[in-house]
Image: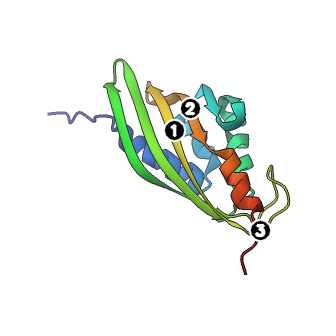
Amino acid sequence: IAETKTFDPENFIKRSIHEIWNWRLLNKVREYYAESVNVESASTRRINGHNDYQTYVLSLLSPFPDARMSIEHFCSLGDADSGYRTATRWRMRGTHTGFGIYGEPTGQPIELLGISHHLIQDGKIQREWTLFDEFELLKQIHRPKSH
């Protein structure tokens, strides 16, 4: 009897976040995301395709070289035929010690709460919607240092 392997959207999303965001394996974008992926993110960012998505990840990780994402909650609806719609609440913690889109490093610790929704079809993420409070992030980066 052949064993039927069922797709587990929770494991798929958790692995993608861990491998891409925590392990910095940007080559894994091609494994998890469709070539024509469309992403909408904070500050009206629009990302299309693998290369844009890798650039997006780098733009958010380079200012926080020690950043780590943890998943706090996950849920999904759907099936293999219609696709899976997922919602993931995540938290990113790190230190602003790298150069990037948020200016010169301040050394400030950051903690960012975000949510990502995905549409998974044919074993790949086709669409992603990610929201986080970028203004709150800037406030944490540029707050006065405590002594």
In the rendered view, would you say 95 is above or below 90? below
Query: Which one is nearer the viewer's eye here, 136 or 83?
Result: 136
**Left/right of residue 2 with respect to residue 96 in the rendered view:** left
Q: Position of residue 49 (x, y in %)?
A: 67, 29
**What number is the disc on residue 127?**
none
Asked which secondary structure carries label 2, the reply is strand
Quadrant assignment for the C terminus:
bottom right
55 over 119 or under it: above or below:
below
Q: Earlier in the sequence, mark 2 or mark 1?
A: 1
Query: Mark 1: which secondary structure?
Result: strand
Looking at the image, is 65 positioned above or below residue 10? below
At label 1, counting other C-alpha atoms closer than 10 Å, the crowd grade (few under 14, some 14-19, many 20 or more) is some
Q: Residue furthest right?
A: 104
Q: CA distance from mark 2 to mark 1?
A: 6 Å
Residue 91 on image: x %, y %: 52, 54
Mark 3, mark 2: which one is toward the viewer? 3
Q: Amino acid at mark 2?
A: Trp
- Disc 3 to disc 2, how far (Cα)? 32 Å
Residue 144's tag is 3
Relative horizontal placement of residue 111, taking residue 77 as reference (left or right): right
Q: CA distance from mark 3 to mark 1?
A: 30 Å
Q: Which residue is tagged 2? A: 129
Residue 64, by quadrant, is bottom right
Viewer-proximal residue, 96 or 48?
96
Closer to the chain start, of discs 3 and 1, is 1
Residue at label 1?
116
